[in-house]
Amino acid sequence: MSRWRSILLFLSVMGPGIITANIDNDASGITTYSVVGARFGYALLWTLIPTTVALVVIQEMVARMGVVTGKGLSDLIRENYGVKAAFFMMLGLLVANFGNTVANLAGWAASMEILGMSKYVMVPLGALSIWLLVTKGSYRTVEKILLAACLLYVGYVISGVMAKPDWNEVFTYTVVPHLKWDAEYIVLSIGIIGTTITPWMQFYLQSSIAEKGIKKEDYKASRLDVIIGCSITDIISFFVIVTCGALLFPKGIRINEAAEAAAALRPLAGDYASLIFALSLANASILGAIIVPLATAYYVCEAMGWEAGVNKTFSEAPQFMWIYTLTLVAASLVILLPGAPLVFLMVLSAIINGLLLPFVLVFATLLVNDRKIMGAYVNPKGYNYISWGTVLVVAVLTLLFVFAAVFPNV
């Protein structure tokens, strides 16, 4: 009976960890993994193991803070480090997340065009649909739809199997590091970490846990939710790299975005593999377009002390709903404008994310070690070594990534 009770408890708590981690594989993430596979084959698969460990450590800390305090990360930063620190961090994240939203809607537009549909119809239709879902639906409804949509990520697994890679070779490259002293190899290695561990994830995960009302006694189930989510997201990353590594890399096909990968797969793996890859990109992009503006609305409102939450109406949380609406509308207009600086916005977004991530992780680690906030749920000493080590490594790598983005010819 206790086993069934544990299963039912997990099903009631499940959602924030799985959704946050999976939707991190948005258009930007899928693009990064596609480029990695096409450029270096399986050579960077080994990076997914330490990246998954780092992701689990960071997401578990943030989830624990949400469960123990019942507050979002922005709330805690404002309360403990002042409005000024929270405001400037939120300002940077607002710009970065706008670029992420543009990237996701660009992925949606590109995948729709591969499927033969006009972006001038599908971008407004997609934006309107997700706006109605978030502004008119309840948290529970939105969560159920997002969880169901996460199942569609299995399309990348199917594409990977259809690519018929040499699985012995894949396994070897996954567990044995294959290092190259190559500028692009280093940048893409850092890019994998940068696209897997992002600032918005930390804010969205903690805010969604707080809004869902998960209690301390449910902490173990919430931690399992996080671990499963982090594991699944990097399994999907693995299969995206394998697909492009098996089919595009041997042919020397260079790509710059995931939509190009979907188109390039057609003559190599057939229409079905290309179609599955394109549909999976559409799903990842539209999910990212839901969650990233939602994360923006959460952390800006929490930082400023405004009401926030999907369960609230426009009259109850006007700032929250308007930030979500304006982010979505502005990003949609950028996609539809001829000659819009999409690449500039995406690069700017990546740079700002890279600059902010170390600060976000330091704040999170300091807060989770504050006994006044966390009580008995502070990091144990051994776990703390892992968390600070993760923060240090991520900080160094993201700063290198920013340097490479700003000075690409150095």
Image (cartoon, helix red, strand yellow):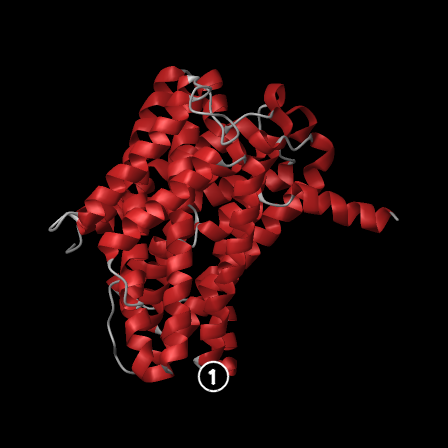
**Image: 30 above or below 207:** below
Question: On the rendered structure, is 229 left or right of 179?
Answer: right
- Residue shown at 51%/81% (left/top)? 167
Question: Measured along the vertical axis of the image, is residue 219 above or below residue 237?
Answer: above
Q: Where is residue 289 in the image (x, y as percent from the top left)?
A: 37, 46
Q: Is residue 81 placed above or below 277 in the rendered structure?
A: above
Residue 351, image x, y percentages: 26, 43
The residue tagged 1 is 166
Q: Which of 238 and 361 is in front in this view?
A: 238
Instruction: Write the residue at 60% across / 50% down.
Output: 227
Left or right of 151? Residue 262 is left
Percent coordinates x, y for residue 360 in the rendering: 42, 34
Residue 249 lies in what quarter of the image? bottom left
On the question of residue 174 being in view, the answer is yes
What's the amino acid at mark 1? Asp
Left or right: residue 241 versus residue 161 is left
SS at circle 1: loop
Crowd class of label 1 (few under 14; some 14 to 19; many from 20; radius 10 Å)? few
